[in-house]
Image: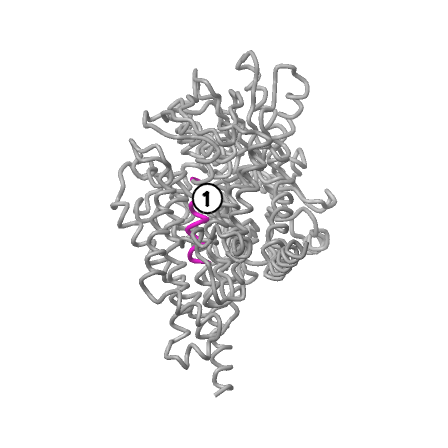
Amino acid sequence: MANSENVKTSSAGSWKNLLRNQCFIPIAALLLLAVFNLIVDPTFFRITFGYNSAGNPVLSGAIIDIINNGSELAILAIGMTLVTAASGGQDISVGAAIAIAGSVILRVLCGGNARPETLEAPIIVAFLVACVVAMLFGAFNGVLVAYFKIQPMIATLILYTAGRSIAAWINNNELPVISDPKFAYFGGFIPGIPIPTPFFIAVACMIVVGLALKFTNLRLYTQSVGINQSSARLNGLNPELIKVMTFVILGLCVAVAGLIKVSRVSSINYSVIAKDIEMDAILAVALGGNALSGGKFSMAASIIGAFVIQCLTTTLYKYGVPATALPAYKAVVVILLVIVSAPTVREYFSTLVKKMKLKGEVA
Amino acid sequence: MKKRLAVLLAGAMVMATLAGCGNGGTAETSAPATTDAPAAEPEAPAAEPEAEAEAPAEPEAEAEAPAAGGDLIKVGIINNDPSESGYRTANDADLKATFTEANGYSAQFAYGNPAVGNANEDQVKAAQQFIQDEVDYLLLSAADTAGWDTVLQDAQDAGVQVILFDRTIDADEGLYAASIVSDMDKEGQTAVDWLATQGLETYNIIHLQGQMGSAAQQGRTKALDEKVAAEANWNMVEQQTASWNAENAQQIVQSVISSGKEFNVIYAENDDMAKGAVAALDAANISHGVGKDVIVMGFDCNKWALEELLAGNWNYDGQCNPFQSSYISDVIKTLESGGTPAEKVIIMEEKGFDASTITAEDVEKYGI
């Protein structure tokens, strides 16, 4: 994970190492956005300390908004990176799956009553049920992909179309509202802690996945399945099982993101919750310079990619980009970033740097 | 081996498709075949109070219908997916509660759901099915405004009366008997007029728009845009679409707060977005509601939103009336007795609620 340490200061190798590092592009994009904001309006970086209406200390400012609102995306990027690496495809049903997970949480908490005075079950129980459900749906996707060899995008298209209806059905089409302030902690602030909770949840997820990648064979197995399935099998791995496992892990990420999403508003709207988030999650993986056809991956780069996307969104909101034009602006920036992070372009730049250095030595 | 795999694969795909449709496919074209009046039963008790809420205005709405005798009036109802929004859920429940056998109707329901295919196409197919089934009345809330001429002509030829509700279509007026709609422009105007009576020195408004291009967005935006253009002390601090989404609204308001701009009005085009905006205000400790720093306005009259009004946390909520069934049954009764409705386009009465005058009764009666 600590890729920045790879950037050596020795003058000879520094440029090459920097360009070769997968985190270079997303970090450069982040810096670019930061510099842009610094020049246009330095108040972007202002963080103010205050108290919310419940009297609890909170930090606010654009940077806080970014780490707050980017949390779900970062969590999803973790799962999406693994799915991409192992299966060479993407899960487009995560938005719908978040609706399902969120609906399950509310269903368990409300016990079928749309407006409960008290919670019917502890929040942790609701969350665990949602985890199980989301992992089952993940396994469903995974089995279609791994055992029935359906293209991931097609396999997950099923849940993509059906998911929001399933979510509505879970709560009998009602829109439950939870009044217990404790439930809002997960998407807001815990009393006494001025940093938004989603960020802590995201960091916890990053630590867990970081440890898993360091101390288990997760990385080795997913990469080898993604690079060459047959040779992975010949080496005694079970590629199908590993693919299903990555989808189940993504299911877990979905449940966590779902908890944050429904907690933010203490309610749900089936048709708009986490809308189009699957595209942002896939984009985060792409921005991280990971091959969307599977194989080797950098988890850190994906996560940074997720925050780049959120940074872009917040920046565009900040400058009041005309409402209807917002997606277009986003698309332009995204195209640029993806082109720059494409392996062929990176190759071209590194040879260019090499040539320049040669010239310099000759002169 | 390969063959066996292919068979397995085909089987899996069929199963998968079935699983997908089984759960989400209420709106499939097969809907007319599977839906029937008894399906309305379980929904009815929950929806009863709302249906009755309208009754005082039209006292005979429910009581008189059985007078038709043993003959049930056959109606085919084509609506949009009830899970689309709280509005649609209330609308569907209201229709199901009114068009029951007890009230003298035999009703079939079909839904168009954009998540499971082409909603409008599915609705057209359902309409053709209903015409074949020889329904007396076709009630229609079309997903799209276009593409209805042929099927409505078929309906006319077959002697089926068409009544549009909730949404109008681009078709010749002669093709339908009546159209019962909300006037979105008026909803916006009512809200803006209310805001003007608040007597603020300057109005610095954050305007959260719905899905751009939708009728509700256009109507609710129009009145505000005109007022801001006309008055010197009305300023638009931010005008942004949050696509009906609470979370987007929260982000937009957060970014306005972070940038330090002054504002004292949140004009959100639905309740969800108002809720998101309020979450952002709460996080920044900006007071809102009756007699506080920021005026909060929403639309749609969800029950939870009206409760916020009652508690004084919000200031205004504009109604978008989903209870069209009593109007529809009035029209049907007029047509059954040989008359024609006085007006082709019937605009429903819609209220705007002020937090300082709303009562617990209103919350029960008008909340959806």
The image position of residue B207, as x and y in percent, is 57, 29
Q: What secondary structure characterizes most of the magenta part?
A: helix
Instruction: Tell me if A203 is positioned left or right of A44 in this view.
Output: left
Residue B3 appears in the rendering: yes
| Kind of residue indicated by mark 1 | Gly
So how many labels did they put on this image?
A: 1
Q: Is residue B207 above or below residue B14?
A: above
Q: Is residue A85 above or below residue B77?
A: below
Q: Residue furthest front?
A: A363
Q: Residues within 10 Å of mark 1 (few under 14, many from 20)?
A: many
Quarter the C terminus of chain B occupies: top left
Q: Nearer the viewer, residue A274 or B122?
A: A274
Residue drawn at (33%, 28%) of the image: A57
Q: Is residue B89 shown in magenta?
A: no
Residue A168 appears in the rendering: no
* Span of residues in magenta: A68-80
Q: Residue furthest bottom?
A: B1
Q: Nearer the viewer, residue A244 or B13?
A: A244
Residue corresponding to mark 1 = A70
The image position of residue B79, as x and y in percent, is 56, 49
Indicate the chain on which mark 1 is placed: A
Instruction: Tell me if A236 is positioned left or right of A95 in this view.
Output: left
Q: Nearer the viewer, residue B133 or B196?
A: B196
Q: How is the image coloured?
A: one colour
Q: Nearer the viewer, residue B245 or A44?
A: A44
Q: Quadrant of residue B302?
A: top left
Which element type, helix, strand or loop, lies under badge 1?
loop
The image position of residue A223, as x and y in percent, is 44, 68
Q: Quadrant of residue B357?
A: top left
Instruction: Tell me if A270 is positioned left or right of B75 in this view.
Output: left
